[in-house]
Image: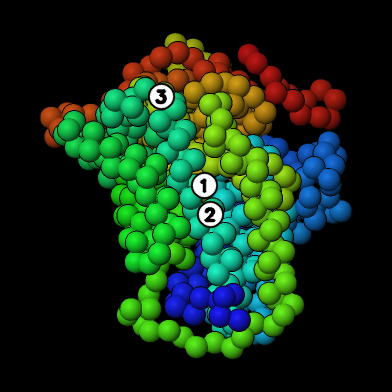
Amino acid sequence: MEWFTAPDHWLSRIVFQRGLAGLYCVAFLSAALQFRALIGERGMLPVPEYVRRTGLRHTPSLFHWRYSDRLFATVAWSGAVLALALVAGAGDAVPLPVSMLLWLLLWAMYLSIVNVGQTWYSFGWESLLLETGFLAVFLGNDDTGPPVLVLFLLRWLLFRVEFGAGLIKIRGDPCWRNLTCLHHHHETQPMPGPLSWFFHHLPGPLHRVEVAANHVVQLLVPFLLFTPQPVATIAAGLMIATQLWLVLSGNFAWLNWITIVLALSVVDASPVTGEHPQPDPPLWYVAVVVAVTAFVLVRSYRPVRNLLSRNQAMNRSYDPFHLVNTYGAFGTVGRIRDEIVVEGTDEPVPHAGTVWREYGFKGKPGDPHRLPRQFAPYHLRLDWLMWFAALSPGYARDWFGPFVERLLDNDRDTLRLLAHNPFPEAPPTFVRARLYRYRYTTWRELRTTGAWWHRTLVREYLPPIRLREPTDGRRADGRP
């Protein structure tokens, strides 16, 4: 069946599958190391309470049948181990049906986590990982050549990721059209990286070139993915180069990396490696791939309609299995950066001279003298949500109160999400939050003060709060 397979893409398939498995591993590790404080039985948004309010039909997950922290940890760590096995080539060491089952199991386990993750898992790259992982189930292994239809679906997904991101920009903030968004973005992005300060201080004309190049890569180059080789490979190479530029300039979890992995599936390596002969695929496999292709194309109706709409939505799933989604990023770019600074004191009653000590976060800006770290593709979920909370308290309505309560209790799992706990011996008596406006220092300020940020107080975000002494055997939040 020469029409069905593309033997010249055998190396591209291997690189794609190993790269995707590596990202799955990162995602499962992120879940395993953070879930107890976020969605565990004693977490800020507990899974047991959530599944009682929602139905299996709307949020399919194995945790609807049973939930415990031990079961969640088992699923998360098992997913990480299985992903590592696939990175090592386990998918090619077993028969084709078993390989497909392994990829399907990986997808189902992560779907179970995402669908109970609530606000903490509301990011577009969760759906992107699931949609990519679903297509990987049908890409086969070394028992057969890569199916042309699945390779086409991967290009179709990459097209929607890039073209959707380009459209949301050109239709959104005017700064994308006048090429000035990067005068602000490197400073106001959710989680800057160690080089973001330097990117921000690039000359203005170069920022305009960055934006113009981004428009070309996201609005024009995606159409070249469907052209013959080597043009499609060149298009994929341009996308990879753009994504690596974004990797250097900030922390966006695995969004950039999964886009790179998708682009690698387009690359034709046959001029270097030659064709890799593989046996003909079994008829049942051909039938399954054809059926899945038809299903995805039919389900693409709503994402396409969204792309063509003037009211284009950003990062939306149209089914609870996250199979065919719409994507986009940064339709609006902030001009200012506000950050929430959380502080505590061990004094019995706050007063004008109270000494407040600051909690340190791993990724989000805090101490002005601390250079931002590189964490991507690892996803610091609390730090990301703190960025949204600074934009509007509405983003933090459900979880910020429980977060503060756990700080007041020196909750071990919550403190593990932080870089610095100023109360290692005993919990604070009061915790407060203040909103500061941050901006990057200039070259001169950096040399003089050693600070990467300058911050000024805007207002109180949360007044001092303590844990009220229980009177009926139960605990409660209390305000002084």
Density class for disc 1 (Cα within 10 Å; few <14, some 14-19, many ≥20) is many
Q: Position of residue 187 (x, y in %)?
A: 32, 32
User: Which circle's residue, 3 or 2, is located before the other in the chain?
Assistant: 2
Q: Give left or right: position of 174 versus 473.
A: left
Residue carrying label 2: 156
Q: Secondary structure at mark 3?
A: loop
Q: Which mark is residue 402?
A: none
The correct choice, above or below, for 424 with respect to 265 in the image is above
Residue carrying label 1: 160
Density class for disc 2 (Cα within 10 Å; few <14, some 14-19, many ≥20) is some
Instruction: Give whichever of 344, 375 is nearer the camera.
Output: 375
Q: Position of residue 396 (x, y in %)?
A: 60, 27
User: Given contact means CB atoms under 8 Å apart, are the residues at marks 1 and 2 in contact?
Assistant: yes
The correct choice, above or below, for 273 with respect to 132 in the image is below
Q: Give left or right: position of 33 versus 236.
A: right
Q: Quadrant of residue 98?
A: bottom right
User: Given contact means CB atoms under 8 Å apart, are the residues at marks 1 and 3 in contact?
Assistant: no
Q: Give left or right: position of 449 versus 42.
A: left
Q: Give left or right: position of 224 versus 114.
A: left
Badge 1 amino acid: Arg
Q: Secondary structure at mark 1?
A: helix
Badge 2 amino acid: Trp
Density class for disc 3 (Cα within 10 Å; few <14, some 14-19, many ≥20) is some
For marks 1 and 2, give the CA distance.
6 Å
Residue carrying label 3: 173
Q: Secondary structure at mark 2?
A: helix
Instruction: Give whichever of 96, 199 is nearer the camera.
Output: 96
Identified at 69% across, 50% down, the residue is: 298
Number of labelled discs? Answer: 3
For marks 1 and 3, give the CA distance.
20 Å
Q: Nearer the viewer, mark 1 or mark 3?
A: 1
